[in-house]
Image (cartoon, rainbow, N blue to C red):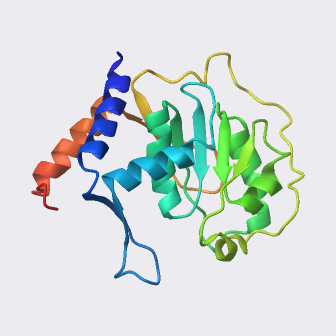
Amino acid sequence: MSARSEFCRQLRDTLVANQNKVLLRVVLGPNFDKPLEFTGASLLSQAEDLAARFRTRDRGVVLLLLPHSPELFLLQIGLVLNGQIPGILAWPTSRVDPEKYQRNLVHQLGNLPVDLLVTLPRLAENLADALPYPVAGLAIESAASVERMFPAGLVIEQLTERNIRLGESDASEDALFLQFSGGTTGAQKAIVGERCSSVRRTVSHRGCRSITIWD
């Protein structure tokens, strides 16, 4: 068993062992004092159910272009458990020009070695014919209000050339996820979240912040 597979097994075992304990709280406005809570059991069940809707090849890279929401956290965990690699993209602010932003996405994301992009339904429809890989829509509770910034209509921007070298999309065995930097122009840059570094950071945070099992 690989180190990554062992990590996923331990993650699953931890969720099962804490099936009745709240392991994740997601704070959403305007009810900031009433976060959504997920126990180990609900986290595992909902994460796996959500990730099952977005299957790719083994170790496939799945970009997540979603606003702050429970689905973003659940899908990231579910994809990791599935053996896929989620790549988290920064959601744009309301200050961007939506039409220019969508055109920029074609050039920013079109040359990335990716198997699937998951975003909100309207944005998925707009980008479906402009990107060289599948785009899937995911409806979330706040989608209607968030999507208003994007006009309905296909993005007609097209890549003139896609520069992907053979094997470039093959991730290292230790990779768990990709965290992209923000920005609406220029090439996208990402940090690879690897198993070893993720474990070290978690242990370090626990020590620095005096986190106990009761937190």
Q: Quadrant of residue 99?
A: bottom right
- Residue at 90%, 52% in the rendered image: 156
Occupied quadrant, residue 15: top left
Q: Quadrant of the N terminus?
A: top left
| Image height of 43 relative to 32, above or below | above
Along the line of sight, which residue is nearer the eye, 87 or 39? 39
Which image quarter: residue 117? top right
For image coordinates 79% across by 51% down, the residue present is 127
Residue located 58% across and 56% down the image:
183
Please state which of residues 136 and 153 is positioned toward the viewer in this rendering.
136
Image mark count = 0
Q: Position of residue 106 (x, y in %)?
A: 76, 47
Q: Is residue 52 above or below residue 26?
A: above
Quick check: can you spot residue 191?
Answer: no
x 39%, y 55%: residue: 42
Residue toward you, 51 or 159: 51
- From the viewer's perspective, is 194 left or right of 110? left
Q: Is residue 2 visible?
A: yes
Of residues 142 and 105, which is closer to you in this image? Answer: 142
Quadrant in the picture for the C terminus: bottom left
- The percent coordinates of residue 52 (x first, y second) are 58, 41
Where does residue 46 sit, x and y in percent of width and height? 48, 52
